[in-house]
Amino acid sequence: MKIMIVEDEALLALELEEEVEAAGHTVIGQAMSEKQAMAILERQVPEFAFVDVHLTDGPTGIDVGRHLAERGIPYVFVTGNLKRVPDDFVGAIGVIEKPYTMNGLQNALSYIARLLRGDVNLTVPPSIIVGPRGSA
């Protein structure tokens, strides 16, 4: 999959990129703010995105999520504060809570990849909280 990472913590973004690439996917861009995320989306269309709720320009990850949902691009929120995610998940497949383990992230990424391929009867790993869109 071609994946976009929207994360304002540089170290976490780099770790996430390493894990995504180790799983055989391609990172098409990293953004630390809503503006940077929108610039990436003007140039490329990811097949999936990881979106932090709070970015360098505030809690604008929710707005990035809305934009992705409007364009039909699946994504998950990655946040340390689950209370910031709206009840309807703004169209997100789910939420991965920080701090996450690398094993938990790998399990979530595997689940997401299989879900997007159309696999059914999937077991949701404990590392991801699925929203209405993330149920198989």
Image: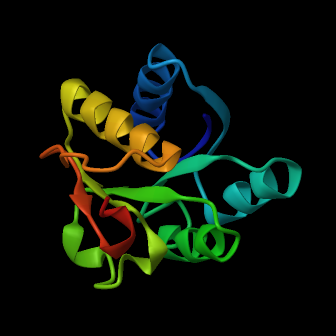
Q: Quadrant of residue 110?
A: top left
x and y percentages locating residue 86 in the rendered image: 33, 83
Left or right of 47? Residue 107 is left
What colour-coding does the image apply?
A: rainbow
Q: In which quarter of the image is residue 76?
A: bottom left
Residue, x 28% and y 85% (percent of image)? Answer: 87
- Residue 117, placed above or below residue 103: below
Work out whether residue 99 can be spotted: yes
Residue 42 % position (x, y): 85, 58
Determine whether, in the image, residue 106 is placed left or right of residue 93: left
In the displayed orientation, state which residue is furthest to the left. Answer: 126
Left or right: where 16 falls relative to 100: right
User: Which residue is pictured at 29% across the width and 40% down the height?
Assistant: 108
Is residue 7 among the parts visible in the rendering?
no
30 sits to left or right of 113: right
Which residue sits furthest top?
22
Q: Residue at x 59, y 72 (%)?
A: 69
Quadrant placement of the N terminus: top right
Question: Camera-side residue: 112 or 6?
Answer: 112
Above or below, 112 relative to 106 = below
Front position in the image: 115 or 65: 115
